């Protein structure tokens, strides 16, 4: 089984719909992250969580929310999806020094 | 100006060539430097990790950090078609260990 599992892998949704992306990890790390990746822009941090009670905004959190249900689970929600949220989304987990981050396979989200 | 600059490419080279991938950065507090490799439709995976300055070698891969120039490099010797991927640099400071990413360079190795 993969260390970090994201569901769904692909999703097409309509503008204005609410959508949730889910992530679970088996590494046992406290730190979890949500990134989006766009061509030419690299990985941009949306939200990160150092433990179940510690959630922080990243550089592009507007339009997104997160929930840390357990040490192993971290979900990302788009409350009202818009087309410019079309992107590849990655969940990751790491040790406290981030010497190695482990990524999921990604969710390709298309908002039409 | 971004904290970490990386040419997105694509960089296309023939099989067997030596590849040089680079990133520049502006924050002198960065101490941890990493290279991740990302194959198409996959998540990034850690390839090399270096703390502070110097070189690190792992098989055909060598990572170099020049803190005086704020410049890091990844060299790939005897490049193979299987090395075709996007290579992302990432770095962090000991103050918060927050990873700052380059845009990634798409590398194509032609058989």
Image (spheres, rainbow, N blue to C red):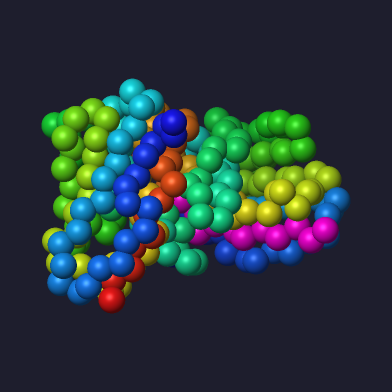
| B63 sits left or right of A85 in the view | right
Magenta span contains residue B69: no
Q: Position of residue B41 (x, y in %)?
A: 51, 55
In the image, the segment drawn in magenta is B101-111
| B43 sits left or right of A45 in the view | right
Q: Residue furthest right?
A: B16
Q: Quadrant of residue A29?
A: top left
**Residue at the spot x=79%, y=48% of the render?**
B79
**Res. A57 in view:** no
Instruction: Assign the C terminus of chain B to one quadrant of the image.
Output: bottom right
**Residue at the spot x=80%, y=44% of the render?**
B77
Q: Is residue A10 above or below residue B66?
A: below
**Magenta part mainly helix, strand or loop?**
strand
Q: Position of residue B70 (x, y in %)?
A: 57, 48
Q: Quadrant of residue B75?
A: top right
Q: Nearer the viewer, residue B27 or A95?
A: A95
| A61 sits left or right of B84 in the view | left
Instruction: Assign the N terminus of chain B to one quadrant of the image.
Output: bottom left
**Residue at the spot x=18%, y=37% of the render?**
A68
């Amino acid at each position: 089984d993969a260390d970090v599992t994201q569901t769904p892998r692909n999703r097409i949704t309509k503008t204005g719909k609410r959508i949730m992306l889910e992530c679970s990890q088996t590494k046992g790390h406290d730190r979890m992250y949500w990134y989006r990746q766009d061509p030419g822009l690299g990985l941009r941090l949306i939200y990160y969580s150092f433990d179940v009670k510690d959630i922080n905004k990243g550089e592009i959190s507007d339009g997104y929310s997160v929930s840390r249900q357990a040490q192993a689970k971290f979900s990302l929600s788009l409350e009202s999806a818009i087309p410019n949220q079309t992107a590849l989304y990655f969940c990751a987990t790491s040790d406290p020094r981030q010497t190695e981050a482990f990524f999921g396979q990604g969710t390709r989200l298309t908002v039409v | 100006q971004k904290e970490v600059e990386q040419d997105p490419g694509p960089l296309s080279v023939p099989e067997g060539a030596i590849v040089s991938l680079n990133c520049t950065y502006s924050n002198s507090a960065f101490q941890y430097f990493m290279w991740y490799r990302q194959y198409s439709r996959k998540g990034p995976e850690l390839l090399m990790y270096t703390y502070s300055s110097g070189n690190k070698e792992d098989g055909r891969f060598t990572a170099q950090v020049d803190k005086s120039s704020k410049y890091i490099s990844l060299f790939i010797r005897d490049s193979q078609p299987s090395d075709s991927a996007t290579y992302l640099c990432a770095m962090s400071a000991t103050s918060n260990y927050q990873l700052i990413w380059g845009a990634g360079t798409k590398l194509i190795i032609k058989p």
